Amino acid sequence: MAGCSVRNGQSKLSGFPTEGAAVSDACTGHCRACRESDVSDSSENEETTELLALPMDAWHRAQGARMVPFAGYEMPIQYEGILAEHQWTRDHAGLFDVSHMGQLIVEGEGAAAALEALLPGEIAALKPSKVRYSLLLDENGGILDDLMVTNVTPEGGVARYYLVVNGATKWDDIAHLREFLPDEITLTHLDDRALLALQGPEAAVALERAMRGLTEDFGFMEAKEYQFGELDLMVSRSGYTGEDGFEISVAADQAEQLAGRLCAELEVKPIGLGARDSLRLEAGLPLYGHDLSPETDPVSADLTFAISKRRRAEGGFPGAERVLGLLADGAPTKRVGLALEGRMAAREGADVFAGDTKVGTVTSGGFAPTLGHPIAMAYVDTAHSAEGTALELEVRGKRLPATVVPMPFVPHRYFRKGAAK
C-alpha cells in the first residue's frame, strides 16, 4: 500500500532508474540515473510551501542519507546506494521511515458501518487485531486512495479502527472522511506518531531478538500493541516490499530511539525510498498517484480482492453500481505486468502498442535488480491483457519488445501462520 502521488509539483517516486550499471552500489546520488530520475531535489521541484521535516530528519542525515522532496516532506531516497539497499532488503532486513503517511483513528458506535459506506471491504467482519487492505472510493467508483484498516477495538469497548493512508493524499483523505463520516463517529489524526517499516526475510529474527516474544503467534495482516520499555508501539505484520515484515507506529519523539535499537541488530540497515519503490514494483504492488487514481477503478486495477463477497451482493459503497457492473461484464482496460527485453526501462507515461495500434499506457516501470531486466506495470485494453501477449513500448522514439506476464514479478514471501515451510 503505501505510495504517494505527485502533488503541487513535488517530487514523485516511480521507476527510479536502476538499469544495468547505470547506478553503482556506491551511488551518491550524482550518477546519470539519479540525475534522470523522477525523484529529484532540483529547483524545478522546490515549492514555495516549506517542506516538512520527518521526526527522524537529523537521524537520517547522520546516517548519510540523501534527502529529497517527497509528499511535502524531506525524505531519504538512499543511504549507500539503491541497488545495494534493494539487495540487502531481499537478503536480510531493511528499516524504512514512512512517517509521512497518515495515521488515523475512526471510533464510535457504528464505526464499521460508517466505514463500509466509504470502502468496499467488509469492515464489520474484521476481527480485533486483524488488518485489511481497502480502497477509498468516490461516487463513480474511482480510487481516491488505498489504505490499511486495523480493528483495534478494546475488549468490551467502543468500536475503534486504525487507518494508515498515503502521505500525499492524507489531507484530502481526512477532509473526505470528515465530510462523509456521521457526526457521532470521531476521526483523530495521530500526527504525534511516526511510522517505521522493518522489511525482509530476517526482519522477524531481528525484531524477536530486540523484543522478546513479539513475533510469537503473529501472522501476516495481524497487529499487536506492544510495550517496549517506555515505548508504546502498535505493530502490524505487513508492508510494501513483498517480503515478510512489520510496520511499527511509535511516538514521534521516540522514533530515533526505536530506529537506533533496531539498526543495532546485524540484520538491519536503514533503507531509502528508492529501494522501496524498486521492491514494491517487483512485488507488483500499485503506487497511488501512478497505478491508482480517481480515473482508475478496483476492477481495471485488478484489486477486486478488496471487494468482499457480502459487499458484492449488497453494494452500498460509493460507485457500487458501476463497479459491480464492471465485475459482472468486465472492464475495458486492465492493469498488467510487462517484462521487457534488453536493458532500457520504460517509465510512467510510455505508450503501449500492439502493432501500429496504441493499446495502453505504462504507469510504473524500472529495472528489476532481482530479475536482471526491466519490468513495468501498465493499463492495456483487456483484449491485449492475456498472459504471453507480445506488445511494444515506445521509449525515446524506440519500440521496446515486451510481454504480458503474471504479477507479482518476484514471489511474495509473507509469513502466514500454518503455511508449509
Image (cartoon, rainbow, N blue to C red):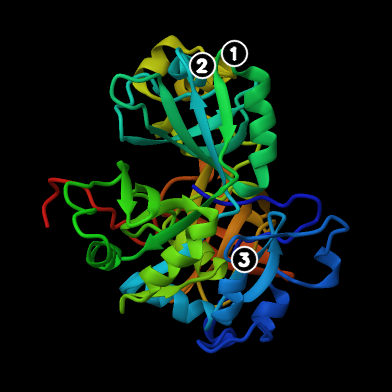
Rendered position, 134 above or below 214: above
Provide residue 331's location: percent of width, then percent of height. Answer: 54, 30
Residue nearest the viewer, comparing 70 with 297: 70
Residues at marks 2 and 1, CA–CA distance in whole angstroms: 7 Å
Is label 2 in a helix, a strand or a loop?
Answer: helix
Write down the quadrant of residue 10 in the picture.
Answer: bottom right
Q: Residues within 10 Å of mark 3 (few under 14, many from 20)?
A: many
Between disc 2 and disc 3, the foreground one is 2
Lower sequence index among marks 3 and 1:
1
Lower sequence index among marks 2 and 1:
2
Residues at marks 3 and 1, CA–CA distance in whole angstroms: 45 Å
Q: Residues within 10 Å of mark 2 (few under 14, many from 20)?
A: many
Provide residue 8's location: percent of width, then percent of height. Answer: 81, 51
Is label 3 in a helix, a strand or a loop?
Answer: loop
Residue nearest the viewer, comparing 243 with 69: 69
Residue tagged 1:
182
Q: Amino acid at mark 2?
A: Ala
Q: Amino acid at mark 3?
A: Ala
Is label 1 in a helix, a strand or a loop?
Answer: loop
Residue tagged 2:
114
Residue tagged 3:
346
